[in-house]
Image (cartoon, rainbow, N blue to C red):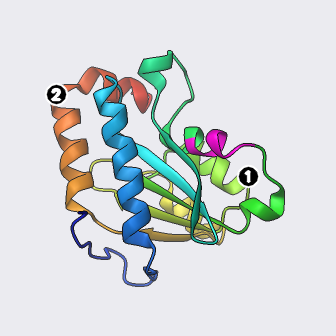
């Protein structure tokens, strides 16, 4: 079972579904790692139900853009603007500028992040545009990413554009 998590930013509120949905995103990250990819997972949730799951597939599919959040949105299929605006996206790692742009484009109002100590994405941009950002500071997400970066720094740097 997924271990309890603590909120890093007390201003945002964790809801009852957050642990369960972050666990789904974490399972997606593990799936990506097992496939030889970068262990970042994401799920898109509407009304408490997961409608899209994904993980980073840049390595596996030779993609320039297939981050975990992008894959989850793609796997949810075509949605209306109102559908996106009723969603929460969960991600094991703070969203990069590209994924944050997608969140803003589709006006997804809430982002729940497993951790942001290994990589700080565009959280301030999201907040400045009215998105609720919840950072759960999850130890499992942190250690998964930290271990991957230590062992695969070249792949990691490629993924974040360094």
- Is 75 in the magenta? yes
Q: Does 54 appear above or below 160?
A: below
Q: Which residue is mark 2?
A: 151
Relative image position of residue 5 (x, y in whole percent): 26, 72
Quarter-of-image position of residue 131: bottom right
> Who's the residue at 78% across and 51% down the image?
79
Say which element carries label 1: helix
Q: Which residue is mark 1?
A: 105
Q: Does 58 appear above or below 2?
A: above
Label 1 and label 2: CA atoms lie apart by: 34 Å
> Who's the residue at 57% across and 44% down the image?
72
Labels 1 & 2 near each other (Cβ < 8 A): no
Q: Nearer the viewer, residue 136 or 158?
A: 136
Q: Is residue 60 left or right of residue 79?
A: left
Q: Which mark is residue 11?
A: none
Magenta stretch, main secondary structure, is: helix
Read off the magenta span. Answer: 72-77
């Amino acid at each position: 079972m997924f271990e309890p998590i603590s909120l890093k930013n007390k201003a945002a509120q964790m809801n009852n579904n957050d642990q369960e949905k972050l666990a789904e995103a974490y399972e997606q990250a593990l799936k990506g790692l097992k496939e030889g990819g970068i262990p970042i997972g994401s799920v898109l949730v509407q009304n408490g139900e997961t409608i899209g799951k994904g993980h980073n597939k840049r390595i596996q599919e030779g993609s320039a853009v297939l981050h975990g959040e992008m894959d989850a949105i793609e796997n949810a299929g075509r949605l209306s603007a109102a559908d996106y605006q009723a969603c929460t996206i969960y991600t094991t790692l703070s969203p990069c500028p590209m994924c944050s742009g997608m969140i803003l484009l589709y006006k997804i109002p809430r982002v729940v992040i497993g951790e942001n100590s290994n990589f700080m994405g565009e959280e301030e941009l999201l907040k400045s545009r009215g998105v609720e950002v919840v950072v759960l500071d999850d130890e499992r997400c942190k250690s998964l990413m930290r271990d991957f970066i230590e062992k695969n720094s070249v792949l990691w740097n490629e993924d974040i554009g360094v």
